[in-house]
Image (cartoon, rainbow, N blue to C red):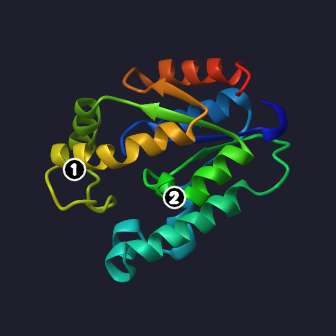
Amino acid sequence: MGDTGKRLFLVGPRASGKTTVGRMLARALGWLFVDTDVRFENNVGMGIAHFVAENGWPAFREAESRVLRDVSEGDGEKGLVVSTGGGMVLSVENRNYMRSRGVVVYLSAPLAVLAGRLARNGDAEKRPSLTGGAIADEVGQVMAEREPLYRACAHFTVDAAAAPEAVCAAVKSVLETPCS
């Protein structure tokens, strides 16, 4: 993985499998795993939806950026897989930071797959609405804005529509490919 150390940042929309695949990858590689959303909630002592309701999106995005830097500091000797929040790429500083500190993999899945996963997930209270619309509409709107950012940020894109084990294997495969 060259001068980026042993850091892997997983980016992508809600329900793309960043946390599930990230945990599997960390186990398979013998690396540490951190989910920035979970770390954020642990740091502030409340869920993201509650924090956003009380403090607004700008305060959340600022705090989210601090969490990204906090979790990925150090020399990367042990190896680290970081599952990022879906909006982490909205900040150009975050995109540049991840690209310079490790390998960034975009977990990409079709809109219908993402909407289906979100509808089945049932944890809407933990995930604040980004648009106030229905799930399928929200996924489409959000992806129209973020897809170019995910792609621009990523060293590699992996199809995340498959089963988590297959996605994990695909990410492991791209890690063996030299970054450009």
Name the outermost residue toward the bottom: 54
Residue sitting at x 68%, y 24%: 175
First reached walking from the N terminus: tag 1 or tag 2: 2
**CA–CA distance in space, label 1 to label 2:** 23 Å
Return the residue at label 2: 38
Residue 158, image x and y in percent?
49, 25
Residue 99 visible in the shown view: yes
What residue does disc 1 label? Answer: 138
**Residue 160, image x and y in percent?**
42, 27
Q: How many marks?
A: 2
- Relative depth, front residue between 145 and 55: 145
As displayed, is residue 57 above or below residue 13? below
Q: Quadrant of the N terminus?
A: top right
- Label 2 SS: helix
Q: Quadrant of the C terminus?
A: top right
Location of residue 94 with respect to 12 vertically, above or below: below
Q: What residue is drawn where x is 28% and y is 43%?
A: 121
